[in-house]
Image: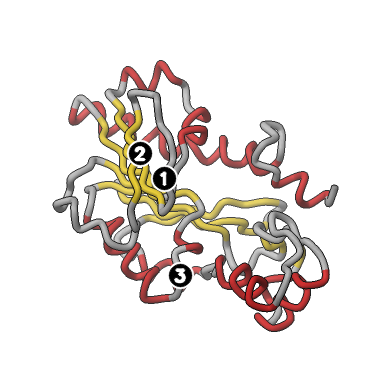
Amino acid sequence: MNLIYALQDPSNPRSLANRMRRARSRHVVELITTIAAREGQCRILDLGGRVDYWSLFDRAFLEASGIHITLVNFETIEATDPMFTAMQGDACDLSRFADNSFDLVHSNSVVEHVGDWPRMEAFARETRRLAPSYYVQTPYFWFPIEPHFSTAFFHWRSEQSRAKALMRRAHGFSERAKDMGEAMREVQDARLLDKAQFGYLFPDARYVDEKLAGLTKSLIAIRA
């Protein structure tokens, strides 16, 4: 197994990726604590979220905070736990919900997957519109290891070069592409952001750099 992939393996609770995810969850805990103290509850909209992600958090804490989490994904997912509601939808257009329908919008490694720049702008508008507070995390373009393909410097290469590489062999979470069409879809599925782009999308946030070995690994925007 590729060492970088092993460090990023989300199914391994001891992987570096999961350890870092647990570390940055403290920012979410702080937001929930503040909101629950003020409102007596915390209604969370998790864009692109999964039920298992929330196992990072102490269940007693979530219950005591009056948490209810609405998960929005392109595909249909199951959520039998009464703490969750799962719905199919486009995180770039949630006009079914009125402004400030939730207390907190949460997004972990999603904005880089929604599509081209206009869709990123739409995603950011919905994030900022749907709750007074938000937490958005995304991998950083200038960190040398691309997290989706588990390869150093991969994202700094041209799309054409990356697509050809995927047609030769698997990279990280992506299997070997059967043709150029599949390879290009994989390449364009993840568009990493730099700080200027991230700051433009979320201008009313405070920013936290998640560091690894002294380098910024991911960007976090928080509006309390």
Residue 86: numbered disc:
2
Residue 76: numbered disc:
1
Give the camera-side residue of 33 and 10: 10
Residue 115: numbered disc:
3
Contact? badges 2 and 1 (CB < 8 Å) = yes
* Secondary structure at numbered mark 2: strand
Residue 186: numbered disc:
none
Q: Position of residue 158 (x, y in %)?
A: 68, 82
Q: Position of residue 100 (x, y in %)?
A: 17, 48
* Distance from Cα at disc 2 to Cα at disc 1: 8 Å
Q: Position of residue 83 (x, y in %)?
A: 34, 26
Mark 3 vs mark 1: which is more N-terminal?
1
Q: Quadrant of the C terminus?
A: top left
Taking the image as shown, residue 114 lies to the left or right of residue 96, namely: right
Give the camera-side residue of 177 and 34: 177
Q: As shown in the figure, which amino acid type bears the numbered disc 3? A: Gly
Residue appearing at x 30%, y 56% in the figure:
127
Taking the image as shown, residue 103 lies to the left or right of residue 63, namely: left
Residue appearing at x 20%, y 58% in the figure:
95
User: Which dot, 2 or 1, sits closer to the camera?
Assistant: 1
Mark 2 vs mark 1: which is more N-terminal?
1
Q: As shown in the figure, which amino acid type bears the numbered disc 1? A: Thr
Contact? badges 2 and 3 (CB < 8 Å) = no
Q: Quadrant of residue 92?
A: bottom left
Around disc 3, counting alpha carbons within 10 Å, would you say few (fewer than 14), some (14 to 19), or many (20 or more)?
some
